[in-house]
Image (tube, grey):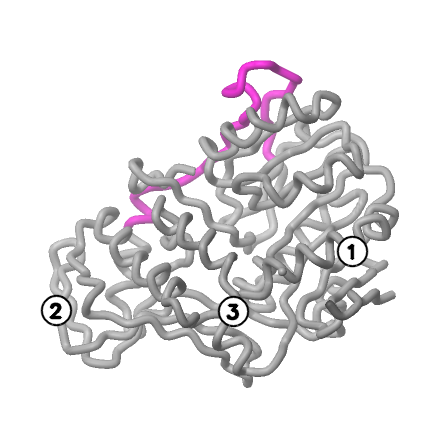
């Protein structure tokens, strides 16, 4: 079915001084790893299960290799140092950036229908939870026995859960610190009863379609109840270009700030004033592409080796795929979900799917 709105919005191990909060799904399939059983506890540190498996040397080497390559690229997780997180929060408030407010409006308008579709929820798993704010409106309605917030940013989870515990005394609050951009690995001991996964914000769009299906397949393995997921829709190029290249330049600052973050991580000497932000919709591939474009020919020292970037040469920093309703429904089916419900706004600008 499809419902429609009536007409009417962690700590980075390579850079310990800054948080790193990507919201990007995982690629390969996995095996469940054993982990000590989780129990209700009162101390905030004990509510967080540390499941991070990051090879700092390998991550650093990968970043350096990608920057030296032609074409050069960086992973979107390097957006999210402390300033980057603040800039992203500002982006979500921009007039041009419709996804956050549109998804929120769909949730608000159809919250009872969506809750009925979800049915009984014993464990509510918030994938890429960050500050857990998007889950807050659902917890009083679905009343899960356990809320599991999953994110790479363990300290952020600690802060958020400590605030939520007094507000939801009947729900066990747990956090899982893990880098699910590499692999979604949730210890079975953290899941109880009927499990519903929550993945809002159209973060699934950061993956290429084949990788997105692999991640959906991973989530399907855990979703004994179902999956509630937000997906941005294909639309006119002008609207999409404006959403990723706003008039105030906040998205540009967000993109350029990644260079400052990278400088701290690998001791490079990128000068953000010599680069400009490019964000535009590629209709042929159905995706927004974000790049950093060199304003002039310049030499950057990357881990002690000079790399020349020519004028107009680009560093690819992010993709954000957009989907028609039938395209994403097919992807859910390929991932193993048999029953799909959809809600949208009156402009059909954004989709909320519940799949089981």
Residues at circles 3 and 1 in contact by the CB criterion of under 8 Å: no
Above/below status of 315 relative to 223: below
Label 1 neighbour load within 10 Å: few <14, some 14-19, many 20+: some
Question: Going 52% across and 82% down the picture, which residue do you hit?
Answer: 238
Q: Quadrant of residue 280?
A: bottom left
> Residue 109 bears which disc, if any?
1
Above/below status of 157 relative to 202: above
Question: Going 27% across and 58% down the picture, which residue do you hit?
Answer: 259
Q: Along the polypeptide, which appears first: circle 3 or circle 1?
A: 3
Considering every residue shown, the one lying at the far front of the view is: 8
3 or 2: mark nearer the eye: 3
Q: Is residue 203 left or right of residue 244?
A: right
Q: CA distance from mark 3 to mark 1?
A: 22 Å
What is the number of callouts on the image? Answer: 3
Q: Would residue 182 be counted in the magenta stretch?
A: no
> Residue 299 bears which disc, if any?
2
> Residue 96 bears which disc, if any?
3
In the rendered image, residue 93, in percent from the top left (x then y), is placed at: 51, 57
Q: Is residue 348 left or right of residue 48?
A: right
Query: SS at mark 2?
Result: strand
In the rendered image, residue 184, in percent from the top left (x then y), is placed at: 58, 45
Where does the magenta region start and end? 33-60
Q: Is residue 155 left or right of residue 224?
A: left
């Amino acid at each position: 079915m499809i419902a429609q709105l009536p007409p009417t919005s962690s700590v980075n191990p390579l850079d310990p001084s800054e948080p790193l909060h990507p919201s990007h799904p995982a690629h390969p399939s996995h095996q469940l790893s054993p982990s000590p059983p989780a129990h209700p506890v009162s101390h905030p540190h004990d509510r967080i299960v540390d499941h991070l498996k990051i090879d700092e040397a390998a991550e650093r080497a990968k970043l350096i290799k990608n920057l030296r390559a032609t074409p050069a690229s960086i992973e979107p997780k390097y957006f999210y140092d402390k300033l980057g997180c603040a800039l992203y929060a500002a982006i979500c408030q921009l007039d041009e950036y419709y996804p956050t407010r549109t998804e929120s409006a769909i949730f608000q308008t159809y919250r009872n229908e969506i809750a009925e579709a979800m049915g009984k929820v014993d464990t509510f798993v918030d994938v890429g939870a960050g500050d857990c704010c998007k889950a807050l409106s659902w917890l009083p309605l679905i009343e899960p026995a356990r809320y599991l917030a999953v994110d790479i940013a363990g300290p952020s989870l600690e802060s958020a859960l400590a605030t939520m515990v007094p507000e939801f005394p009947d729900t066990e609050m747990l956090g899982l610190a893990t880098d699910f951009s590499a692999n979604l690995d949730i210890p079975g001991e953290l899941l109880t009863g009927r499990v519903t996964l929550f993945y809002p914000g159209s973060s699934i769009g950061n993956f290429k379609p084949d990788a997105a299906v692999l991640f959906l397949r991973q989530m399907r393995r855990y979703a004994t109840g179902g999956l509630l997921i937000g997906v941005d829709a294909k639309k006119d190029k002008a609207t999409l270009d404006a959403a990723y290249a706003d008039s105030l330049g906040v998205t540009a600052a967000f993109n350029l700030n990644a260079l400052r973050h990278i400088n701290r991580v690998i001791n490079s000497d990128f000068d953000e004033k010599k680069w400009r932000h490019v964000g535009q919709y590629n209709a042929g591939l159905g995706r927004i592409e974000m790049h950093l474009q060199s304003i002039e020919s310049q030499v950057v020292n990357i881990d002690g080796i000079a790399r020349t970037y020519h004028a107009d040469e680009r560093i690819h920093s992010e993709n954000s795929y957009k989907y028609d309703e039938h395209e994403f429904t097919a992807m859910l089916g390929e991932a193993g979900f048999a029953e799909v419900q959809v809600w949208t706004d009156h402009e059909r600008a954004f989709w909320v799917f519940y799949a089981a």
